[in-house]
Amino acid sequence: MAKPSSGSKRSGESNAPASQKTGAAVSPAGPSILASFFHKPLPLYLSAALLRVVLLLYGLWQDANSPLKYTDIDYLVFTDAARFVSRGQTPYARETYRYTPVLAWLLLPTAQTTGNPFWDAVLFHSGKVLFAAADLVAGWLLERILTMGSTSKAGRVIPGMEAATARKFAAIWLLNPMVAAISTRGSSEGLLGVLVTALLWAVLARRVTLAGLLLGFGVHFKIYPFIYAPAIVWWMDRETMAAGSKAKTVAGKRKSPLTSSAPTTSNAPWLNRVMSFVTPARIQLAVISLLTFLLLNAAMFILHGTPFITHTYLHHVTRIDHRHNFSPYNTQLYLTSSLSSSSSSSSSSTHPLKSLQIESLAFLPQLLLSTVLIPLALAKKSLPSAMLAQTFAFVTFNKVCTSQYFLWYMVLLPLYLPGSSFLRDKRLGLAALALWVGGQALWLQQGYELEFLGRSTFVPGLWVASLGFFLVNCWILGVIVGDSGEGLVL
């Protein structure tokens, strides 16, 4: 073995110390810096916070100096609604406010004034700070989920991911410029990210009461989290819940997930199967989530009456938004909206297209995939990847698909990627990313010509771009579904 003194003086020669040959010595190259970045949580979360601070400050400059504003129009809707609430009025006095009053309450500080322009600006933009902070909380919850250990139904302990590795995957969300930009522009999707990741953490931790509260509140806050209920219920069989509490299965008795409550024959009557499906955990989740949802809605109805039901829920069934909409239904929604605007001058019955309204049936394949087929196929194999696939399908097949909706599934992406085909096959992953980004870019180019240059690009340009992006998303969804159960993290 070489002497330490000579090894330190002649480190560049072929007879360098063994530790240096094996790479044990600290190297000044990039990988060691990257490893140290994720070794502790502070660098990652501080970087994520600084990214959002920079974007917030840049947004203030762009709003003041450019006709194209950085602040999202939705943020102006939120803050206007909060201003109405601060005056003792209903938030629905603000046209196009289609959300729960809870969101307007959370943004009440934005309606306060001090007489000082600086502090007034700070208060007005405090909602963006709230949304950006929610991004960080969601990232922290992702790290917690990735590092969670679990117990298989056979009683085998499955360790969680190392913290440093978990932070690398959480960085996909935390350091994602698209996520940071959407939150700092004033979109509330970061709050949804917290609700969804907290719900998943509570379910995996077998905290059924907390999961029920989060599910009920999440559906009240934004309708779409209801799609997770079937997957969670299907996942929560007796064996899974018992494995989580480290209960031991009786030796020599194998039980299927549907018949774990009592010993039955393989040809058990349908009633026994139904009764075995109804477990205490499932009942507890259903009761608590339903009560939470109903009580919140009852309180809001008492406070705001019918406008609460109309704008928060019913509007989303009949909405015909076609602007900034990546969906293939975009052109059909535009035609429907134009017919609706002319309904005052002619009867709707005279318009064949008006009576057709194909987009009204868009929810059929959307709900079939996201609430029935995907939960049944994937939930018992991997609940996180099932929830990702559900959300991906819900957004892809939704008749209204905007950039903010992409965050609904992007927050679950770090839980799926560790064992995915996209990471195992780098070329496949790069191809998927290129097609996903390229599909958006093609659509945005057509949308720019339509909205800013005044050129009619609906057909074939915008429709073809929408259809191409839809097909790319369908392919990605197929890969996600096919990956389920193949070495995923959870």
Image: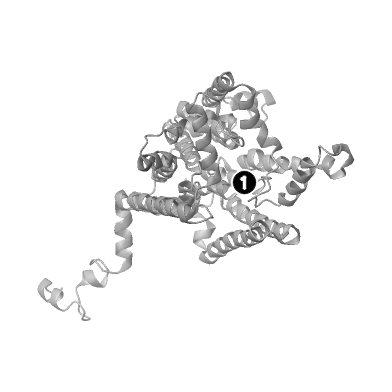
State the residue at coordinates (70%, 42%).
320
Determine the image quadrant of residue 476: bottom right
Residue where numbered disc 1 is placed: 395
Q: Kindly identify the amino acid type of the residue bearing the numbered disc 1.
A: Val
Place residue 358 in its image quadrant.
top right
Front-most of residues 61 and 218: 61
User: Where is residue 18 shown, x and y percent of the image?
Assistant: 21, 71
Q: Is residue 135 left or right of residue 405?
A: left
Residue 27 lies left or right of residue 437; in this view the side is left
Q: Is mark 1 on a helix, strand or loop?
A: helix
Q: Which residue lies furthest to the bottom in this view?
A: 13
- Which of these two is toward me, 424 or 3? 424
State the image coordinates of residue 286 (x, y, percent, origin top left).
56, 25
Q: Which residue is drawn at 29% across and 58% down?
A: 36
Q: Is residue 122 visible?
A: yes
Q: Quadrant of the N terminus?
A: bottom left
Image coordinates for residue 378, horizontal then vertical, percent: 59, 43
Residue depicted at 86% across the width and 37% down the height: 347
Residue 110's place in the image compared with 447, above or below, is above
The location of residue 19, given as percent across then percent down, is 22, 69
Name the residue: 26% across, 69% down. Answer: 28
**Nearer to me, 262 or 110:** 110
